Structures are given as C-alpha cells and as structure tokens.
Image (spheres, grey):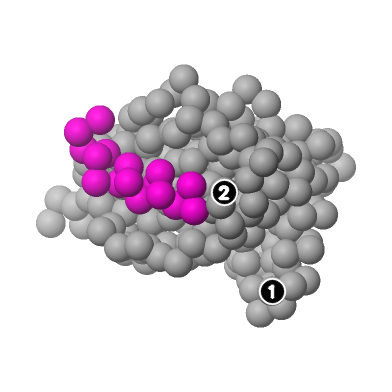
C-alpha cells in the first residue's frame, strides 16, 4: 500500500514536470548542443530526485575511478528507465542511441529530440549501422559521450539479452575508448511497472577498454563477458 502511494506521488511529479520541460526544451532550439543538454537534463535530475525521495530508490557508484574524462562510448546493461535518467548524473554530457519511435512520444519525445540523440530505424539494419557510425563520430567530435545499450531493449533482472555489436563497431571504427557498465536498477524500477520499489541501485563502472587492435566482435564479447560477469557480484561490491 505504501509503495502504491509513493509511486502515485512520483507519477504526479512526472506528469507535471514533463510538459513543462518539453516546452523549455523547444525554446532551447537556437542554443548550442551542450548548452541545450545542460538545461534540458535538469528534468532528469528532478526525476531521479523524486524517485529517491518518493519511492526510496537510492544509488551508489562502484568503480568511480573509471569515470571518463573525455568523450567515450558507454556500453551498459539495460533493465529500466531509471538508468537512462541517472546516467546523466553520473557520466559526462552524453547522447543516446535509441529507436526513432521514441521521438514521437508527446512531450517526452519533443524534449528528447533537442538532446541530439542518434535515432535509428531498427528495421533497416544496414542503414542504421551506417547512421550510427556517421552520427556517432559527429557527436564524439562535438564533445559528447555516446550511451548504447547493446541488448537493445530492457531485460528483467536475472536474464540476459542478445548483445548486438553496433556499439563495438562504432568504437573500433572511431578508435574510441569503451566503458562497460553493469547495474541492477530493474529490481527497483521494473519495465513498464507503475509500482517502484525502494532499494539501493549499484552502478558498476568497468575499466576503460581500448578498441585498437580488436575486431568489433572481439570487443563486443569482452564487454558482454565483463557486464554479465559483474551482474551477480553487484550486491557484494
């Protein structure tokens, strides 16, 4: 009962703030991309704050010494919507690789479009990969990190999705450092779940991986092995 009340209060905050920040996001259109990012992501900070204070979702970062100081490619586990918000508090300015349908979501999608995401059409795999490399290089040159979820969709805790090599291929072709990230946010904020559960989310940041000398397949396998090997250890870190 208490979790339902807390989740209702959290949803009320989300409903009020999202249209407001969507309007602010549209007004930032003439500004430089990094300036737009810093303004619009205040919304994410507010939502993470609300998740903590209303739903009891706290977090800690393990491996903070591996946090990047320059643009990199972040390849991360994907379990919930929470990490897409919290990563903005943990990592430097970033853009995300996502399915283009998200940009059509009222209010949320409008604000998202102002953050220069790499929005791909999953049904056109070859064109999507070319777009990822071309736009990924542009975003890295502009000073952004790129966040990619190799599994492509949210996977429930304890399960393992199929890892795709697109992010690794981008890293190899641009010779950009990869940061693997594991976390267990799905235990508190499950996919499409209204009820949010209190708890401590552990975000584990792995050591940087230099893609030079590796094939995309070798790099993708190294990332997958580290993330999936780290997942059972998160509670003991």
Question: Would you place residue 137 above or below residue 237 in this image?
Answer: below
Q: Position of residue 4 (x, y in %)?
A: 21, 57
Identify residue for label 2: 219
Q: Quadrant of the N terminus?
A: bottom left
Please report the residue visible at 59 percent of the width from the left and 39 percent of the height from the top. 178
Disc on res. 125: 1
**Quadrant of image for the C terminus:** top left
Residue 18: x and y in percent read 55, 52
Residue 1 visible in the snapshot: yes
Can you name the residue that lies furthest to the bottom here?
Answer: 123
Front-most of 94 and 126? Answer: 126
Of 202 and 206, which appears nearest the observer? 206
Specify few, some or many for label 1: CA neighbours under 10 Å numbering under 14, 14-19, or 20 or more: few
Part of the protein shown in magenta: 221-237
Q: Is residue 49 magenta?
A: no
Residue that appears at 45% across and 41% down: 181
Left of 50 or right of it: where is 41?
Answer: right
Instruction: Pick whichever, 131 or 9, lies toward us.
Output: 131
Residue 79 falls left or right of residue 104: left
Q: Residue furthest front?
A: 213
Q: Give me the C-alpha separation between circle 2 and circle 1.
A: 20 Å
Q: Are marks 2 and 1 in contact (CB under 8 Å)?
A: no
Q: Nearer the viewer, residue 5 or 180?
A: 180
């Amino acid at each position: 009962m208490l979790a339902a009340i807390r989740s209702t209060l959290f949803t009320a905050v989300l409903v009020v703030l999202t249209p407001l920040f969507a309007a602010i996001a549209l007004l930032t259109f003439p500004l430089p991309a990094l300036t737009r990012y810093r303004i619009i992501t205040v919304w994410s900070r507010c939502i993470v704050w609300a998740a903590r204070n209303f739903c009891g979702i706290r977090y800690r970062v393990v491996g903070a010494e591996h946090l990047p100081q320059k643009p990199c490619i972040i390849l991360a586990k994907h379990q919930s919507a929470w990490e897409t918000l919290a990563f903005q508090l943990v990592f430097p300015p970033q853009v995300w690789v996502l399915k283009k349908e998200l940009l059509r979501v009222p209010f949320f999608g409008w604000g998202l479009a102002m953050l220069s995401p790499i929005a791909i059409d999953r049904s056109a795999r070859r064109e999507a990969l070319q777009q990822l490399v071309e736009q990924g290089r542009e975003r890295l040159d502009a000073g952004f990190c790129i966040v990619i979820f190799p599994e492509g969709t949210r996977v429930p805790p304890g399960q393992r999705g199929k890892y795709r090599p697109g992010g690794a291929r981008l890293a190899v072709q641009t010779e950009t450092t990869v940061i693997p990230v594991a976390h267990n946010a799905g235990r508190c904020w499950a996919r499409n779940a209204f009820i949010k559960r209190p708890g401590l989310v552990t975000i584990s940041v792995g050591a940087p991986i230099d893609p030079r000398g590796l094939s995309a397949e070798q790099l993708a396998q190294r990332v997958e092995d580290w993330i999936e090997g780290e997942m059972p250890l998160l509670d003991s870190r």
